[in-house]
Image: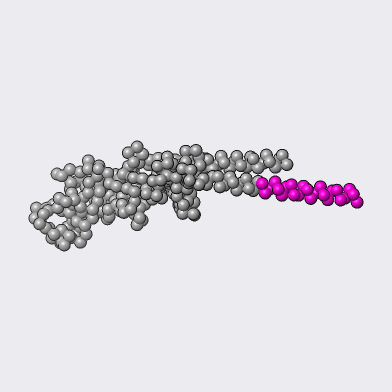
Amino acid sequence: MLKLLSSLFALSLFFINSRATDSTCHTDRCTNGPEIRYPFWLSHGSPPEEYCGYREFGLICDNGNPVFSPPPGLWYYVKDIDYVNHSIHLVDVDTVNQTCPRALHKFPIGSLPLSHSPLNLNLSFYYNCSSHPSGVSSIRCLSSGLYESFVFFMGNETKGFQWDQNCKENVIVTVLKDQVTSNGLMNQFAGAINEGFVLDWQTANDCKECEASAGLCGYNVTTKEILCYCKDGSIKSNDCKGGGGSLEKLHIGLIATGGIGALLTFKSSASGQDSSSSCILKN
């Protein structure tokens, strides 16, 4: 009996300690690039069943480099993450290290808890234009035959000309302000695109209650449940307040229930053995 109680107690302690360890939002990283920690998390091929971080902020490693892939499946290298100022520095995988990059898309912020940094500005590219005003320089490396391409600071296009009607494609690209000047844009846009841009992050809507209670937000993929990793090592639903419902307590309760069941089974078996022994002795 004493050995059984000791074993159950040890098992309970092991479980509690392991859950407390698991509830800590750990730090990760790829071979290169910045440290990856809350609210970002590293996905090793597929999302883990349970993780600490914003659902939208999962990163992957590609050839040792951290990559952020917002919908609809675009890829951006993570150059840096500033956890103090809540900003992330990204570079488009499609145009990185190109001497004459042809930007294909702008960053799709959509409903992501992100916004453009004041450090950014937008460039407006017009590709394959059949006509253009006189005196406007084209991008030679992106022009072919009768079709020419152009770049402007967004909003500074030549007035009075219908660029959208005369060009096959218009793409808005975000770059850092300090990478371009009004007089040197034609020679600077390639370097600016390769340097990337900065986005600021805000608290995700489904994590506001958790963070307001001094917790760190997470998610359970199987149960589709918002988790809150609390300072005391517990993991609760939605927030760290009393009403959140500790997931640890549930597991510990199950262990305790199992332990009581085991004790009752043990006592029942022991009583049966005593009765049988008594009958044998009497016979």
Instruction: Classify the position of the N terminus by image quarter.
Output: top right
The residue sitting at 13% across, 59% down in the picture is 162
The residue sitting at 56% across, 47% down in the picture is 250
Image: magenta residue range? 260-283
Q: Main secondary structure of the magenta part?
A: helix
Relative to the observer, which residue lies in front, 18 or 197? 18
The residue sitting at 46% across, 52% down in the picture is 225
The residue sitting at 21% across, 50% down in the picture is 123
Q: Position of residue 18 (x, y in %)?
A: 55, 41
Rendered image coloring scheme = one colour
Q: Is 282 colored magenta in this rendering?
A: yes
Q: Residue furthest left?
A: 134
Q: Position of residue 114 (x, y in %)?
A: 32, 48
From the viewer's perspective, is 64 left or right of 262? left
Q: Is 33 colored magenta in this rendering?
A: no
Depicted 242 relative to depicted 142: above or below: above
| Any part of residue 118 in sight | yes
Q: Position of residue 263 (x, y in %)?
A: 70, 46
Depicted 230 relative to depicted 276: above or below: above
Q: Residue furthest right?
A: 283
Residue 125, by quadrant, is: bottom left
Q: How many marks?
A: 0
